[in-house]
Image (cartoon, coloured by chain):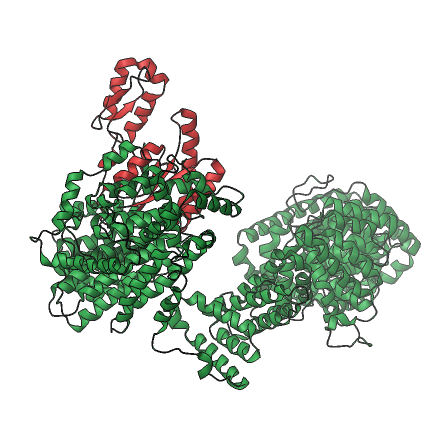
Chain colours: A green, B red
Amino acid sequence: MASGTGDGGNARLSIASQFFTQEEGSGTDSMTTSERVVDLLNQAALISNDSKITILKKVQELIINKDPTLLDNFLDEIIAFQADKSIEVRKFVIGFIEEACKRDIELLLKLIANLNMLLKDENVNVVKKAILAMTQLYKVALQWMVKSRVINDLQESCWEMVSAMASDIILLLDSDNDGIRTHAIKFVEGLIITLSPRMPDSDVPKHHKNDISLERIPKDHPYIKHDALWEEGKGALEQLLKFMVHPAISSINLTAALGSLASIARQRPMFMAEVIQAYETLHANLPPTLAKSQVSSVRKNLKLHLLSVLKHPSSFEFQAQITTLLVDLGTQQAEIARSMPNLKEARKRPRDDTDPSLKKMKIEPSLGEDDEDKDLEQTAVPPPKPSVQTSPLSDTDITAEFLQPLLTPDNVANLVLISMVYLPDTMPASFQATYTPVESAGTEAQIKHLSRLMATQMTAAGLGPGVEHIKVLKEEPKEEKLAKPESVLIKRRLSALSQGQAISVVGAQGCISLLEEEAPQAKRRPEPIIPAPQPRLAGAGGRKKVFRLSDVIKPLTEQQVDKLKLAAVKRILCSERAVACSGAAQARVKILASLVTQFGVPLKSEVMAFILDDVRNRLDLAFAWLFHEYNAYLSKYPSGSLERYDECLLGLLSGLQEKPDQKDGIFTKLVLEAPLITESALEVIRKYCEDESRTALGMSTLQDLIFKRPSRQFQDLHVLLDLSSHEKDKVRQQAIFFIKHMYEKEHLREYVEKFALNYLQLLVHPNPPSVLFGADKDTEVAAPWTEETIKQCLYLYLALLPQNHKLIHELASVYTEAIADIKRTVLRVIEQPIRGMGMNSPELLLLVENCPKGAETLVTRCLHSLTDKVPPSPELVKRVRDLYHKRLPDVRFLIPVLNGLEKKEVIQALPKLIKLNPIVVKEVFNRLLGTQHGEGNSAVSPLNPGELLIALHNIDSTKCDMKSIIKATNLCFAERNVYTSEVLAVVMQQLMEQSPLPMLLMRTVIQSLTMYPRLGGFVMNVLSRLIMKQVWKYPKVWEGFIKCCQRTKPQSFQVILQLPPQQLSAVFEKCPELREPLLAHVRSFTPHQQAHVPNSTMAILEASSKQEMELKDPQPLMEQELEPAPLLPRMSQDMIALRLAQEKALKRQLEEEQKLKQPASQPRPAHVLAPLPAEEPMDFREEGPEVETPTIFISVQEEEEGSGGDGSLLDSSAEGPPPAKEPKSKEAGAGSAADEEAESKPENLPPAEPAPSSTQPSGPQPASQPEEQPEAGAGQEQKQKAES
Amino acid sequence: FSKRGFIVRSFGTGTHVKLPGPAPDKPNVYDFKTTYDQMYNDLLRKDKELYTQNGILHMLDRNKRIKPRPERFQNCKDVFDLILTCEERVYDQVVEDLNSREQETCQPVHVINVDIQDNHEEATLGAFLICELCQCIQHTEDMENEIDELLQEFEEKSGRTFLHTVCFY
């Protein structure tokens, strides 16, 4: 069973082409291909998802396969996508370049540079794809160069670039990325095959039949140098081989390289020897870094490739080695035999080599190689034993030959004993995996194998006679070539060589010891071993004369050194772009960072300025430096000083702080990623936070610090807390915002709370402590508290309060101790937080319940804040009530919860309430009448307006002076919206029915009449009822009665006529001017009507002269009083009829008004207003004698006008706007408030009252005070008696 | 695998499709041209009881809903990113086949073998292991660079050893 994840790219391709063909089929004939391409490209430019690839693939299909003539036209458009941010799109572009160039190689001229850019892309997958493309294109490009006999400059530079890229890719064998290395290996494989000649016994993959390879390159090509390429190919192979012996090579790279070597060996048999030797080396020296399973994977692979190589006829000469290896790898003999090529066939082949019928060109290169081989054989010091092998002797071969006779049993035993010492404690995975028991110990074959194994090791370590020989051999041609102009190739080889050596030495420890042990035996030929490396080095460096450095140099002066240092660093700084292009940016940053850390101030400031010049792009340098400094500090820990680190961090932070508008959070990044935040750095952060335009960013950085650096979180938190009392509003608010967030965290909570409370506690000091002014201003002496300093202490506390209600008690205790100024400020700022806490807060309720001594004002303030907008909760009411009854009988406590109290309680408290400051009284009424803030519905008063007015009338005058009561009633009348004519009618009705009559009854009647003239009829009714109740027995009321009659003439004539004669004359005594009109009135009656007027009455009416006499003799009048009695029923019948008619009319009028509210409001003032101004002054003047003095009224008005409606209990804190409300409404209200009235009337009638006593749905309640009225009435009666 | 969002195909590597028969030495053998439907009907006819009980019918039923017939890996020329095998023998066959192909694009394909014994319990465990492995590979930023380490981790975690190689198309 095998499964695999399908390759996305290919799948998409097929889908894309399907889609494409479908569309073709469905008929887009109307569009030309060109138009379609344009259309598709436009689509692709707009969308950004996966379908972009699909569309681009369609374009590719169209312009490469369907209509290649278009290719040139749309090239640029497609290439433009190489900057796309999608990796897939960039990969597509590479694929496109590959396809396009395969289709038309001339395009390479244009595209090679693009491909080069993509080869240096930052994404590894793109780079990989580019390498793949290069693997294909290199061949194509070479072919193109070879074909074109005339090479122009463009083509030349294009090929140069291709070559350069090839070298670059070879260098990628050292890439950090495993995948890139794998791809580079495959590229090198292709390169080697291309740059080496195809031989008759080469395996030629069908697909690559027509690919170019070295033998097709004419030697006389004007530009392409056959030999140079051949050298390059061999060099590449050498690179690959060196790569393979790297001790830390990854298993995948190794696998890939093994595969590559196998395919090289099969396709280019001339390299068979190198390949086999590489396999041998590897087998003996598996990289120690491989894990057990990787070892088995690699061995499996090695086996597979050995078998495949074995199948190749050219491996015939190496059969013995391969077979040994295969056996070691655990291959069955049968399997090996199966893979052996037919011997005869194999033997024939080498002979074929020399077949003269072959093309000359093909032989020449192989001859070139043979030359080398000959050299080797000639110069080899010990002529090797004649062996079956005719192939060139490799260094391993030579060493093996050399070792074989030395491996006597004694020597081997010694070797084993010595190497025991070097054995590791545990068995390495690779050994465990590869160990196979030695079957044929001591046999010739085994000794030979062993010597080969050892030789392989030694060669890998660069030791042994073989290595020396090869080196000597190789150096000669190299040195010759050094002088040649195209030395570029060679140089690369050299560097690779030394590199490879350096690497292999690492794994050679054991071998050296072996060698030393062998030394006695090896005495015969010691010379080539030791001196060899020296000449080689000398050869590489230059062979002309011995050069000694000390001869030509002098020490530089200090100044020069500094200057040079600075200049060097500057150069490194300036090389930014160039280095970035070449991909060594990381290295540059590292170098700079460590340089700066080591050197002095001028350099540092130079680099600092450089970083700050473009922080965004040089941040990595900044960090590298910072971390270097920190490292330097740590390395000397604990004695090291942080000073340099601090300087660096401070420089960066302050630099950033001074930069205008950087919004990308570099500052934050720096702060959060710095290894340590020092005190001074914290100070910079603090300053950053204080900058209003950056507060938010700064503080969120600080917050991150607090959360992410627990070790120093309290220092950081302290900064933030300090900022919470900052003088700048914005800074403070931000700080508080963040602290609130932190306050939710359990571990920070306590600290925050303590800080807030500490600040709060400062308020008990008589003068503000110096903390509040910052460290620099030492103004402790005698500076008084200012509002600013007070608030500073409160901000944080107040912000925390809604989150932790318990804190309120702290405030209360501080409050009691604080001075008046502080108290005032506290009261002012507390409102918002208290409202935030809500009246259900248990802590707040507890505060109310306990109300510490001295904190009464605070508590009241709290109560007010709470009930300002919402009705008090029963819980709150209960606490306040308890407080009031049990501990602090200050009626002012009740005001905020008035609407939560019961009716009875309110009535009981009324006398006390109306004695308070007028402003407070006004607030009380606002609350009771629901006229507060114009939203009457929110608070449901326990008393409806009528009840309130009645209660006022019934206040016992011993508990409260009349003046206050009058003022209070005036406040009621001022609320014209509430006290409508209906309400007043009900009030009058009820008051009238009381016995004794309330003292202020007639005042209210007159007032009502003044406000609502249309109540005239009703008032007449009231008057006549009063007569029945013998109104004259109540002096004050009687006075009012007369006044009322006087004002309502001639309407009142009817009433006056009902008075008994004695009272009638009393009326005339008071108001003589009434008599004449009344007489005239009576005379206008029909005779029949006149007959109903009692004689006694007539007598009083007519006899103006008799007046005196009648006054002297009141007795008869008193008697006559009884006379009209029989008339009364009739009269009252008339009266009732009259009243009914009037009420009907009134009702009708009201209904009309309600219907036509808006339109009616306009005409109304006209007829309502008209009589008012005329009557109003009279009202005051005439009422004067009855109720003390008119000044009362005036003074009330003045007070109301001059003082605020703030409703505050505190006299001093009255700062609210003047009420500008109804005080003058008797004149203005009727007119200007007419609109309002019309609108708000329905709302002002409470829809339903929760009080159990009232079941009526709304306003007028004719008889709803059953119990209280009598009591109050009785009290009033008593008082009146006392007065009279 | 499909459920977890992988684009996946399954293959056989042998010369024939073998299904368990009434006895270990008497398997049902079909060639790769036979559709799942035909196998299903064939087994249904042979011994409905047995093949329902051992779950073969269920498996065939599921398979035929995915594709019409089994596929042979060696005959598939499509390009994959990753090939997973569950038996060393199969791994060898796959690697050998891939290596014997002519290389054209040089695009790498990773072959990983996770040995799983052919029974239900192991298969379920193995399926989850492989699925987890695939998901981890999916989540690597740079698969080729990290796969080595990832496999080491998995070996440690699961206590199995994996074979892993890279081949090229």
Indicate left or right for A125 with A777 as reference: left
Please indicate whether residue A358 sits to the left or right of residue B34 in the image: left
- From the image, which quarter does the C terminus of chain A lie in? bottom right
**Residue A844 drawn above or below residue B125:** below
Residue A8: image location, x then y, percent: 30, 46
Residue A612 or A244: which is nearer the viewer?
A244
- Can residue A861 be seen here? The reply is yes
Farthest residue to the left: give it. A357
* Residue B51 image-quadrant placement: top left
Looking at the image, which is closer to me, B62 or A401? A401
Give the tally of numbered discs.
0
Classify the position of the N terminus of chain A by image quarter.
top left
Q: In this view, does A745 lie to the left or right of A510?
A: right
Q: Position of residue A1193 (x, y in %)?
A: 77, 66
Q: Nearer the viewer, residue A792 or A410?
A: A410
Q: Quadrant of residue A674?
A: bottom right
Is residue A1047 depicted above or below A282 in this figure? below
Residue A926 visible to the viewer: no
Q: Residue A119: percent from the left, percent from the top?
A: 31, 61
Q: From the viewer's perspective, is residue A818 above or below residue A396? A: below
